[in-house]
Amino acid sequence: MNEVLQLELIVGIIVTFILITIFVLSAKKGNFDDQKKMMDGMLFDSPDDLRSAAQQEAKQEEMRKKKRESKELDK
């Protein structure tokens, strides 16, 4: 009986170490970073608000792209 408990303890420690390692590596890679989505979710409640936010973001990206293109033409 004592050997079984020791085996369970060793296996439990190994599994715990593996899971903690996976979590830490995922957190370092940024897999849990989605702050913009969380903030937008709090600001915009209805589907119409979300659509307008997506359109606004697309417009901002388009403006950035035009700005980059104009800088490249100036060079």
Image (spheres, grey):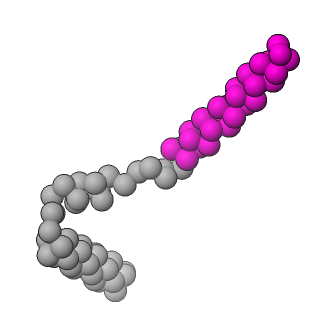
Which residue is most to the top? 2
Residue extent of the magenta highlight: 1-27
Q: Is residue 65 above or below residue 10?
A: below
Q: Residue at x 56, y 39 (%)?
A: 24
Q: Residue 37 versus residue 58: which sits nearer the camera?
A: 37
Residue 29 is covered by the magenta coloring: no
Which residue is most to the front? 1
The picture places residue 50, in percent across and down from the top left corner, at: 19, 71
Which residue is most to the right? 3
The picture places residue 20, in percent across and down from the top left corner, at: 60, 35
Q: Residue at x 23, y 54 (%)?
A: 39
What number of labels is visible? 0
Say left or right for 60 vs 13: left
Residue 71 seen in the figure: no
The picture places residue 13, in percent across and down from the top left corner, at: 70, 26
Q: Residue at x 30, y 59 (%)?
A: 37
Say left or right for 22 vs 4: left
Image quadrant in which the N terminus is located = top right
Q: Is residue 73 above or below residue 7?
A: below
The picture places residue 41, in percent across and down from the top left corner, at: 23, 59
Residue 20 is covered by the magenta coloring: yes
